[in-house]
Image (cartoon, rainbow, N blue to C red):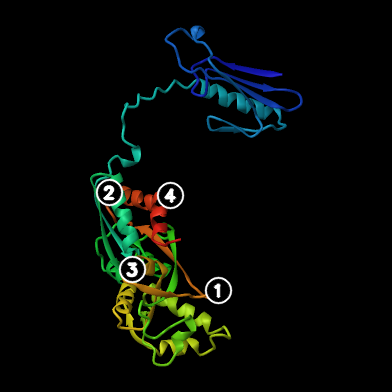
Amino acid sequence: MLKLHCYTQCPISSILHLYYSQDGLYQLSLNMPHHQERESPLGRHVRQSTIYNLQSTIVNGITTRMLHTNVRLIAMLILVMLVACGTPPQVAPPSPAHSEPASSEGLQGELIVFAAASLTEAFGAIGTKFETLYPGTRVSFNFAGSQQLVAQLQEGAPVDLFASAHMAQMAMAIESGRVTAGTEQIFAHNRLAIVTSAANPAELAQMVDLARPGLRLILADEAVPVGHYSREVLERASKLPEFGSNYAASVLANVVSFEQNVRVVLTKVGLGEADAGIVYLTDVQSSSEPLLELLIPEEINSIAAYPIARLNDTSKKELADAFVAFVLGAEGQAILATYGFQ
């Protein structure tokens, strides 16, 4: 049996033993005192001893495993231990009795966030909570259609974070050079819903009714994420026998206006300027107007993915990263869920 003792002030421990037996079993004995007393090394007492059988055990970040080895490997292990044991002790400064969380230190100033219109209520609540957690910060939002936001971004508008309702607009932001590819993260999902006013003047009962001749329908423009998703739904429906192959064309023929913002679609339907519209499910849930929702079958509905990314030319990198972390964290996700996001 090979045995090594280290009685120096080792950063790994005060006394470190390595055993090797003929059956190839390693065993490490690590004696770790609770504190270092102001006495000679011989006067220090071992307060606690922990035996690590090296079977995928981690000791201060070093993983060892039970294995068969040769003398060269043993020598290497001995050398590593001798070098570690010769390192002078590192004394950490005492922590203040009442310190602020490290994540909140140094976060000050205004954060400018460009976000899809469908995030208005949810991000408003998230921004308020973020400012409470990080005093001295202020979150300013610019809510609009994702295609409008990315156009402003491409023109050089000052912005720290971009949250869109579709990856297509995030890809355009990356193409512009202002967002680094691979830094975007999906933080929420949404679904589509057909909406009509509470009065339901057209007496719509199901999705197939959108193809009825003479119906007044409002959709978002195809360049708007919800407009793109709406056309995906119509195309999928056209492949089902209960809707018929001409369904998408018949529905689009009923459109009286294409809007640049999902909130405009919602507002006009609520005001009775159209019989129905297609919006996000979260828009229906957050609307102050009494509305009726028509079901879109699950198998043909679209799932909208929302990416968020920091602008690579922002001067508020730490603040932007903290906001993204909050959105992705448990509290941010809980707020999004209360507004219907998944």
> Considering only vertical position in the picture, is 186 above or below 35?
below
Comparing labels 2 and 3, the label whose residue is closer to the camera = 3
Please state which amino acid type lies under the numbered disc 1.
Glu
Q: Position of residue 30 (x, y in %)?
A: 58, 21
- Mark 4 vs mark 3, foreground winner is 3
Query: Label 3, label 1: how many angstroms apart (C-alpha)?
Result: 26 Å
4 or 2: tag closer to the N-terminus? 2
Residue located beneath label 1 in the image: 299
Residue 336 place in picture, x, y as percent: 39, 57
Mark 2 to mark 1 CA distance (whole Å): 40 Å
Secondary-structure class at tag 4: helix
Residue on which the image places disc 2: 131
Residue 66 x, y percent position in the rendering: 69, 32
- Give the distance between the C-alpha atoms of the residues marked 2 and 3, in whole angstroms: 25 Å
Q: Earlier in the sequence, mark 3 or mark 1?
A: 3
Residue at the image position 33 percent from the left and 83 percent from the top: 274
213 up-or-down from 61: above or below: below
User: Which of 143/73 is in front?
Assistant: 143
Q: Are marks 2 and 3 in contact (CB under 8 Å)?
A: no
Amino acid under label 3? Ser
- Residue type marked 2: Glu
